Amino acid sequence: MKTVYLDNNATTAVDPEVLDAMLPYLRDLYGNPSSMHTFGGQVGDAVETARARLAALLGASPKEIIFTSCGSESDNTAVWSALRTQPEKRHLITTRVEHPAVLNVAQYWEQQGYSVTYLSVDAKGRLDLDEYARALTDDTALVSIMFANNEVGNIYPIQCMAETAKERGVLFHTDAVQAVGKMPIDLSHLPVDMLSLSGHKIHAPKGIGALYVRKGVRFRPFLRGGHQELGRRAGTENVPCIAGIGMAAKLAGEHIQDERVYVAQLRDKLENGIIARVPDCMVNGDPENRLPNTSNIAFKNVEGEAILLMLDQLGICASSGSACTSGSLEPSHVLRSIGVPFNYAHGSVRLSLSHYTTEEEVDYVIEHLPGVIETLRAISPFKD
Ligand code: PLP
């Protein structure tokens, strides 16, 4: 059976060119980039090429890029560094709809005696900029707000929020794990101090991420040990994956228009096709301002997990809530924060595309998904 992969916000396929860029460092060029000899040196060059490629994608300078093991490590490091460099400040601002890589970190610091403001969202998942401005105080050490939401795809007004933080002298971090590669980001014009990203969301392998730290921003390492990454992140570099994320960044820059036009058109075709054929469903989030690849649809009076199981039997990979929260039958924290009605929130399914998604695949889902919902509604214990 053919696999129709519509779970690209959970992870993406490794691009064949990314794999090709990695293989030499898994086979022959196994030296340590910190070694003095030429053999290690050429491996060190690969790390720097990758750093330059990632910096170019973001409009940053290579020295501002620190390689990490994943988006979660980048998020943890950003918060850790902001709090450790400003011990006198004891307040954090974030949102209720962050990924657990920020939300659980904020809760951890709250348990350590910090105060945390969790900004609320409206029925479309939008933030209130006045609430944000009111939350900033002289005690605020860091604002950490995601660039784009992993579940519903909402894009947040990072430019404006980072400018406000800057005016108030407060550090600003953004978790851009879902935004990088799906929309242009130019850090030469965007006044954020730190930005997290992850390789496996941009067609590089799992186990590699990066943290951008703007030049001049004080930094404390989260991982201590050797002097790698200019002393900012200890541990021998994961060179094959670093070469991979560098190539993925280069390709993401080349594909950015595809994401905005081709992928968005396919997503709209998919979403409109489903809504036209299935009664009592609605789009979660803000359709006017979201990632080009993401559609989160709530089907009334059905269980999301049951939809996923039936789609799985048809070879269709999707997700209910985020991959990290599935497995629990509670609606995700994002859908609860948005206030999606209970009988809709339970039947929410996230479909996330990539430039590998084809029109034929979209047609296949439009053809089969309505039957799945009809079958499940016929046996559903939830009725009006
Ligand atoms: N932040 C967001 C918005 C995410 O979607 C994810 C992964 O789903 C992460 C952080 C964590 O990234 P990683 O899986 O690389 O740790």
Image: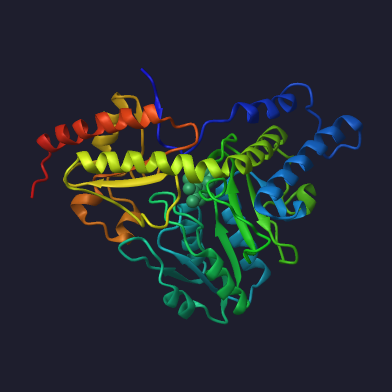
Q: How many marks?
A: 0
Residue 5, quarter of the rendered image: top left
Q: Tell me, yes or no, if residue 9 can be seen here.
A: no
Residue drawn at x 59%, y 49% as measured from the top left? 197
Name the image quarter holding the N terminus.
top left
At x 71%, y 66%, the residue is 217
> Does any portion of residue 356 appear in the rendered image?
yes
Horizontal side of 142 relative to 277 (left or right) equals: right
Relative side of 49 to 188, left or right: right
Residue 201: x %, y % from top left: 53, 41
Residue 186: x, y in percent? Answer: 63, 57
> Left or right of 131: which side holds 57?
right
**Residue at x 37%, y 28% (from the top left corner):** 361
The single residue placed furthest to the top in the displayed view is: 1
- The front one of 286 and 26 is 286
Q: Is residue 187 above or below residue 260?
A: below
Look at 64% across and 48% down and name the residue there. Answer: 210
| Residue 143 pos. (x, y %) | 54, 68
Residue 198 is drawn in which quadrant?
Answer: top right
